Amino acid sequence: MKFNTKAIHSGQAPESRTGAVVVPVFQTSTYAQESPGRHTGYEYSRTQNPTREALEACVADLEMGKHGVAFASGLAAEDALMHLLSAGDRVVCSDDVYGGTYRQFERVFRKHGIDFQWVDSSDVGNVERALAKGTRMLWLETPTNPMLKLTDKSAAAAAARSVGALTVVDNTFSSPYFQNPLELGADIVVHSSTKYLGGHSDVVGGIVVCRDDELAQRIRFVQNAVGGVPGPWDAWLVLRGVKTLGVRMQRHFENALQVARFLEAHPKVERVIFPWLESHPQHALARAQMKGMSGMITMYLASDLEGARRFLEKVRVFTLAESLGGVESLIEHPAIMTHASLPAEVRASLGIADTLVRLSVGIEDVSDLLSDLDAALAVV
Ligand SMILES: *Cc1c(COP(=O)(O)O)cnc(C)c1O
C-alpha cells in the first residue's frame, strides 16, 4: 500500500466487538483476567494499550519500519534511546540539533558517564573521523534545527555500521512523508509527534521506529520499565493527525516554497535557508535523499535584534510561538526562544544570531501568509 492509504488504514482495522471504524480511545488503566495470569494479552496500560498500539503500528508502517514504540513526548522517546547505552559509551551527534536534545544529552546523560561528541555532520568526513574513536551510537538530525543543514544519511549510516555503531535519525522536521531514514540504512528513527505527525498543535508526543526485532524488544523494555508512555487520548490525537499527514505535508511544502522565494527576493531579508531553494548549499543532496521539504524556513533579517523584535511583534497571521509542524503558521526567534538552552558560544558557532528568525509555514492560503510577512517586514 502507498503512503496515504497506510496513514488511514495501517493498525486501524475496524474494532472487533462493535465494528467501530475509528480506533476507540481505550481509556482504561487495567484489564480483567479470567484466571490469575490468564488474560487477553492486555494486563496494564503502561505495558499494553490498544489505542497506543494502533498509533505505533501506523507510524511504523509509514516509516517503512516494523516496530513502533510511542512515548509521552519526543524527549521521552530520546531518553528511552539513551537508556540503550551504558556508562562509558560514546555518541557522535549532529552539532545543530533541537535545543532540548542538546540539553538532555549534555545535562542529564553526560553525568551518567555517556560521552557526546558534537560534529558538523553535513560533512560526512567529520562523522567518519569522529566514529573512528570507538562509538556506540551516531545521532543525526537532518535537516537540522534551525540551520537546516543536511547529512548524507546513506554515507553516514554506512560509516556507523562499519564500526558497529547504531544510527539514529531524528526525522521530526521532514516527517515520514518526505524521507524514510530506515530505507537509507539508519537503524532507528525518532519523532517528536508533537510536530508534523500530530500536526494540529494540540498534543505532545514522541515515537521511535525500527526494523530489528531484538532492538525493538530492548526499546519496548525501556518503555515499560521507565514508563514514559503517552495516555490513550494523546495517542488517539496523534493517530487522528497522522491520517491527513500526506495532504498536509504537500501543502506545507507548496506554501513554504512560495514563502521562501518571496523572502529571498525581499530587500529586508539578508539570507534565506530552505533546502529546496537553489541557493541552499546542499540543494542537490536534498533532492537526492528527500521527496520534498516541510514548512521549515530559516532567515537572517537585514537588521539587528531590535528590528527582529519589531518584525516579530508585527506579524498577525503568523503566531509568535515555539514549536512547529501544525496547520497554523508559527514564527520564532531561536536565540531567545527555542535555542536559549544552548550556551551563547555554541549558538554563535552555529550561526544562531540575533537576526535569525525561524518560520513554520502552515497550510493557510499562501497569499495571506505573503501579505502578512510583507507588512511586518516593512517595520524592519
Ligand atoms: C520538538 C522536537 C523534539 C522534542 O520533542 P518534544 O515532543 O517537544 O519532547 C525533538 N527533536 C526535534 C527536531 C524537535 O523539533
Image: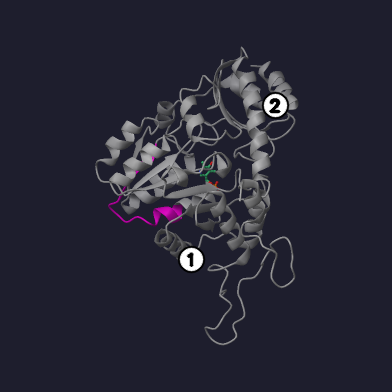
Residue at the far bottom in the pictured view: 35
Q: Is residue 116 visible?
A: no
Within 10 Å of the Cα at label 1, are there few (<14), some (14-19), or many (20+) other Cα atoms? some
**Colouring used for the render:** one colour
Q: Residue at x 69, y 37 (%)?
A: 328
Q: Considering only vertical position in the picture, is 343 above or below 192?
A: above
Quick check: 121 left or right of 135? right
Mark 2 — residue? Answer: 315
Q: Position of residue 258 (x, y in %)?
A: 65, 24
Mark 1 — residue? Answer: 224
Closest to the camera, between mark 1 and mark 2, is 1
Of the 4 image quadrants, the one containing the C terminus is: top right
Q: Position of residue 370 (x, y in %)?
A: 70, 23
Residue at the far top in the pictured view: 267
Within 10 Å of the Cα at label 2, are there few (<14), some (14-19), or many (20+) other Cα atoms? many
Q: Is residue 16 visible?
A: yes
Marks counted in the figure total: 2
- Magenta range: 79-94
Q: Position of residue 277 (x, y in %)?
A: 55, 22
Q: Secondary structure at mark 2?
A: loop
| 90 in magenta | yes
Q: Residue at x 53, y 49 (%)?
A: 63
Please tell me which of labels 1 and 2 falls first in the chain.
1
Q: Nearer the viewer, residue 284 or 269?
A: 284
Tell me the kind of residue under disc 2: Val
Q: Position of residue 204 (x, y in %)?
A: 60, 50
| 86 in magenta | yes
Quick check: 245 left or right of 364? left
Q: Quadrant of residue 152?
A: top left
Tell me the kind of residue under disc 1: Asn
